[in-house]
Each structure stands twice: as C-alpha cells, then as structure tokens.
C-alpha cells in the first residue's frame, strides 16, 4: 500500500493498493477467422462510439447542428462512469474564483436534473473562502484548498434518464447493447465501424466517427498513435469497482471523522489490518447512502481481460469485508447494507491520443486562451490559472474521419489527472460533436474545420470560452 498525499498537482489524497501476482498466460496457438460479408445496419453523418459523458455530449451537440447521428453504447444506459460507474461525485466545474467554466451541455444537465437528485453548495457560495463554509463542504467533496467549489454529487438513475431523454429529443438515433468491434478504415480515413450485438456482427457507415470509448479503442485499432505511460502510484491511474451502501447516517459519520481525527485515524489503521484493501466513504446525493470510490488498485491494465477480471473480484470481495467492518465499528453504519456495486468498472486510464496538439503540464502556468480553444478547465489548484483546451487535442496526427473525446484526448500524464474527469469529458465531447457536424456539413475532414466557425457554434450552445476567443468568433 502507498499513501498518495494531496498536492498542488493532485486534488485527492488516497491509499493506493498494489496488484496481486499474475501468472503468465499460456501460448495456445491461434485460430483462423475467415472473411465474411456483414450487413450494414445504418448509414449516418456522425457515428459516436460510446455513450459516456463525452459521447452523450458529442451526439447531442452534433444532432443539434443538423447532423444525422447514431450513438452506439454497449450497456443499457448513458452516462458511463458518471452513472454506471457510480462516479457520482462530479469534480469541480467552477474555477477557484467561483466562476462556472464547465458550461454548455454540462450546465443544461444540472439545470434539468430534479433538485432532489443533486447535492452541493449554492451558487452564492462558489469561490467562498469562509472558513466555516469551507470546513463544511470539505467533508462533502466540494471544498479544496480552503475554497468552496461547485462539485456536486448526483443521483445516477436520474442522470441516466435525463441523458437519454436529451439525446433522443435532440434527434439522436440511440443504439444500446451494441459493442463496437473494429473500425472501417479506407485510404487513411475511418468510414465507420463493425459492431457485435445479439443479432451478430453488423456495420455502420459514417462520414465522421467520434471515438468516445474512453480507452481509445477505435482510434488505436484504426492505427492512430497514442501514449499509455502512467504513474503507477498515482490515484488517477488506478482501477476499482465503486459501490454504494444504504441505510447509513452520513451526518454521524462526518461528525466522527471531522470531530475525532485521532479515533478516525485509528479506525482506518484497524480497517487496513482487518480488510487489507480498505477505504473511507464519500457522501452521495442522500444522507442515507454512502459512496465508496475505492480501494484504488495499482498495476492493473484496463486493456487486459485478466486484469479487469481480477480487479472486479478484488473489489467485490472488498465490498463485503467493508460492510462487516463498518457495521461493527463505524458510527452511522450500524444498519448499513449492500445496495449496489457499479455495473461498470472504474477505469481511470488506458490510452491517450497523440494528437495535433495536447493539454500539457508545461502550459499550466500560462493562463492563455489558445487560438483553437474549445473549452476551459479549472486548474487542479489555486496556484494555477484556468487551462485552455485546444481543438488539436481531439484530432489524431494523421488519421482522418475521426475525432476523439473524453478521458483519452491528447494530454500528458499529469494533465490527464483532470482531463479524465466527468466535466472535462462533457466539454471535449460537446466540442467533438459540434466539429463532426460542421465537417459533414462542409464536406471536409475534421482537421479542416474552421476554428472560428466551431467556436461560434460552441458559444451558441452555451460553452464557456475566453473573451478573446468570443471576440474572434463574433
């Protein structure tokens, strides 16, 4: 076990647990799969592969600009890790001064979610440095470095439903229970994908494909360059399956954790001894539901089926051990019960596109709006200004017909710590979808899209861009 401390470059402190030993996989030869003809399920302007936060935003943005859009999703819901992965703590959408900079599609979601489905500070408190308010919200994942932020927790079922309904009402053709298999690549351009479902293998042809798989499955299989370097001890490069406990009293737990730090430290030490993998709970959207977003497990690959299986096995066993220990020893957990383990494994990192440009650690201190800015992200600490996201981070270096969005956009491993978060996925997804629609409408490749036209379209959809960019776009 390693303990990762919170720093100016990391928002969270957490324990990170090493992997179990893995026996080598035996070499068993190969099987020849003969070529075959497969039916074309549909032809469309824009195909979005993956219905997580970025894919939902991409499909909606493209459809609202008039494109014929298909959104293909392997599960039975939209929202990805923000819903099926139980990452229901939505990281900071306001900057350190309290200004809402993650807007557009993200802002629409929160405007339309029922009030009872969201828990977080009021807008009047965003950016507050009041000690009492910061202390209160720091226990509720909404204050860091003594500053209150808009980083709420949400009801995942409400977000699933709302994401679906927004996509459908925008004209998106939604396809659940369909797993993308291989990209269709013709003369250096992605022209669609093949996918598997209960009907067998079929194909979708598209003018532009948006890879929103989170792991870069489509661009990697199409031959685009990518990075996969990680920091093994970093919280942001671990995996686990999250879960919920019901029947808890989080007010009592917070009073214990915040009011008796020595006893809390002793509790955590005893928990590690008793359970091995061990973590603390986070608040949810309700005081009677606790969220566990760990224990975070290091050294496993999200691209290895044996590793994915091992993380699931370890996480589910940890869930059971946590319940027994918390019921016996944690104030507020005496009547806790197993409520839900996440249907989707919590993958934080697999691949990162090597793009035309990237979000880079070396630019954190600049605070400048890049000429091709398509969104703005709050910096990881008040030490840095807001950070510009360039359109080039969504574009492969050479591959045409494809855009990337979500946690696999082009960035270095330091910047990936925040670029993988749910709000940033909404931002890059909305930009990718708008760019794809413009490319189709103009009959050009995504890399040839006029950045001023794209920025104007994003501004019209409510995205926050810098004043200098607004002046250019106008």
Image (cartoon, helix red, strand yellow):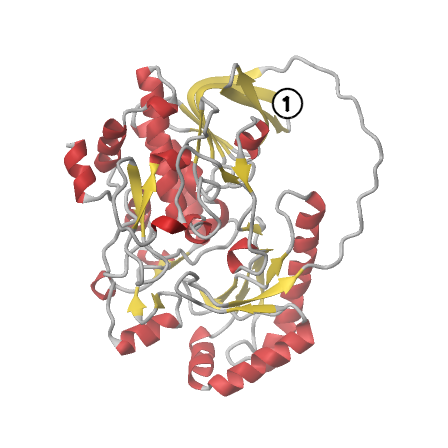
Count how many numbered circles sit on residues in the image: 1
* Image position of 123 with respect to 332: above or below: above
Image quarter of the N terminus: bottom right
Residue at 31 percent across and 73 percent down: it is 134
Q: Is residue 168 visible?
A: no
Residue at 37 percent across and 31 percent down: it is 433
Task: Choose top left, top right, bottom left or bottom right for residue 384.
Answer: bottom left
Q: Is residue 418 visible?
A: yes
Task: Choose top left, top right, bottom left or bottom right for residue 210.
Answer: top left
Element at badge 1? Answer: strand
Q: Nearer the viewer, residue 174 or 240?
A: 240
Which x, y percent locates residue 74?
A: 56, 36
Which x, y percent locates residue 14?
A: 52, 67
Image quarter of the C terminus: top left
Residue at 66 percent across and 48 percent down: it is 308
Q: Which residue is mark 1?
A: 201
Task: Choose top left, top right, bottom left or bottom right for residue 15.
Answer: bottom right
113 horizontally vs 278: left or right? left
Which x, y percent locates residue 459?
A: 22, 37
Q: Nearer the viewer, residue 276 or 334?
A: 276
Q: Residue furthest front?
A: 362
* Image position of 188 with respect to 80: above or below: above
Density class for disc 1 (Cα within 10 Å; few <14, some 14-19, many ≥20) is: some
Which x, y percent locates residue 112?
A: 30, 47
Q: Nearer the viewer, residue 311 or 454?
A: 454
* Image position of 357 with respect to 123: above or below: above
């Amino acid at each position: 076990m390693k303990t990762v401390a919170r720093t100016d470059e990391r928002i969270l402190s957490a324990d990170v647990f090493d992997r179990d030993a893995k026996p080598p996989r035996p070499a068993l030869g190969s099987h020849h799969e003969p070529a075959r003809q497969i039916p074309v399920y549909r032809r469309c302007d824009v195909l979005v592969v993956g219905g997580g936060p970025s894919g939902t935003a991409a499909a909606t943005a493209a459809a609202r600009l008039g494109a014929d859009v298909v959104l293909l999703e392997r599960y039975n819901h939209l929202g990805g890790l923000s819903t099926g992965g139980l990452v229901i703590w939505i990281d900071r959408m306001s900057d350190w001064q309290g200004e809402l900079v993650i807007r557009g599609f993200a802002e629409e979601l929160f405007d339309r979610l029922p009030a009872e489905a969201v828990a977080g500070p009021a807008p009047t408190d965003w950016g507050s440095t009041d000690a009492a308010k910061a202390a209160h919200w720091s226990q509720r994942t909404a204050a860091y470095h003594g500053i209150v932020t808009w980083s709420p927790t949400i009801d995942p079922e409400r977000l699933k439903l709302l994401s679906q309904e927004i996509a459908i009402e925008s004209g998106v053709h939604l396809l659940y229970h369909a797993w993308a298999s291989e990209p269709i690549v013709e003369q250096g351009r992605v022209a669609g994908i093949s996918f598997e479902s209960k009907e067998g293998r079929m194909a979708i042809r598209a003018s532009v494909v948006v890879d929103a798989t989170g792991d870069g499955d489509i661009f990697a299989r199409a031959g685009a360059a990518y990075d996969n370097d990680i920091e093994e001890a970093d919280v942001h490069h671990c995996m686990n399956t999250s879960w919920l406990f019901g029947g808890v009293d989080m007010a009592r737990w917070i009073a214990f954790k915040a009011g008796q730090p020595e006893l809390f430290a002793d509790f955590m030490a005893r928990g590690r001894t008793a359970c091995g993998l061990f973590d603390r709970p986070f608040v949810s959207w309700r005081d009677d539901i606790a969220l566990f977003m760990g224990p975070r497990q290091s050294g496993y690959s999200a691209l290895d089926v044996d590793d994915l299986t091992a993380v699931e096995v370890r996480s589910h066993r940890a869930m059971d051990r946590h319940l027994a220990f918390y019921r016996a020893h944690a104030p507020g957990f005496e009547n806790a019960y197993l409520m839900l383990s996440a249907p989707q494994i919590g993958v934080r990192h697999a691949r990162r596109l090597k793009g035309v440009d990237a979000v880079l650690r070396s630019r954190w201190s600049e605070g400048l709006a890049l000429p091709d800015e398509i969104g703005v992200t709050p910096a990881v600490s008040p030490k840095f200004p807001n950070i510009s996201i360039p359109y080039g981070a969504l574009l492969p270096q050479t591959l045409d017909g494809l855009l990337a969005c979500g946690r696999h956009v082009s960035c270095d491993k330091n910047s990936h710590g925040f670029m993988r978060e749910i709000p940033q996925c909404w931002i890059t997804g909305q930009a990718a979808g708008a760019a794809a629609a413009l490319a189709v409408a103009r009959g050009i490749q995504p890399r040839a899209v006029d950045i001023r036209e794209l920025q104007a379209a994003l501004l019209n959809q409510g995205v926050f861009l810098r004043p200098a960019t607004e002046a250019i776009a106008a």
